[in-house]
Amino acid sequence: MCLFLLFFPIKTQFYNITFITFDAVLNSGALSDIYTYNYLGWLIGCQEILETQKVLGLQFDFFYSVVSNFFFILSIIASIILYKRIHTKQNFKYMDWILLAVFSFQLFETLERLLDFIAYPEYFLLETLSQWISLLKNFGVLMMAFVLFFKTCNPCMRKQIIMYALPASIASYILWFLILGPMILPIITR
């Protein structure tokens, strides 16, 4: 339960560290000179995005796709390992909870995009190949979540997820995004 109480701080700071690392490797730190890393874990700010696109040019889209695909691939690997581990032994160990949390990073992003798609369908017209690929990736994540939860997990494991992980994640969301996160790592834009 403690892991999921810390879920959103861990997730967002993992995203920040990943952005910093990939920026250092791919862009020699150009992104870190423009952005301030924040409690959301994403690059934010219209002026910052325009400046980054000017500094990096076409490499900005490449960088952003590399980072987002890294998160996706890491999540898929975690779900496959988790599937193999719990499929054979049918109980949760600490490592399984960590793998579930890593998979949940992408699952929460997928659920957020799904809610955006439902609330603002005019912004999701699916006109480009990358938009279709993103949609297919999101449906793949949802299908993997359903398979893990309904087909692989036994009733006891499902009960643990619903009774411990879900409420702790909701509490983590409220504590991090509404209270602690804005105080510790505020969003600073130009």
Image (tube, rainbow, N blue to C red):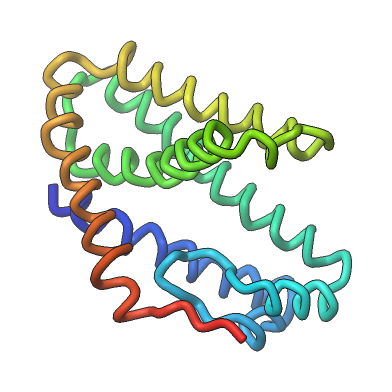
Q: Quadrant of the C terminus?
A: bottom right
- Left of 2 or right of it: where is 10? right
Q: Quadrant of residue 126?
A: top right
In the image, taking residue 91 as reference, residue 31 lies left or right, namely right
- Residue 141 vs 55, above or below: the answer is above
Which residue sits at x=23%, y=47%? 170
Q: Residue at x 35, y 31 (%)?
A: 82
181 shown above or below 116: below
Quarter of the rendering containing residue 14: bottom left
Q: Position of residue 54 (x, y in %)?
A: 85, 77
Q: Which of the 4 image quadrants contains residue 79?
A: top left
Identify the residue at image location x=31%, y=80%.
184
Image height of 162 relative to 70, above or below: above
Residue situated in front as seen by the camera: 45 or 165: 45
Instruction: Give x and y (percent) for residue 162.
Output: 18, 29
Residue extending farthest top: 151
- The residue at the point 13 percent across, 38 percent down is 164
x, y (%) of residue 8?
32, 57
- The relative height of residue 180 versus residue 82 in the rendered view (above or below) is below
Taking the view exactly as shown, the residue that stands out farthest to the right is 58
In percent of width and height, residue 129 lies at: 82, 34
Left or right? Give the position of 74 relative to 101. Answer: right
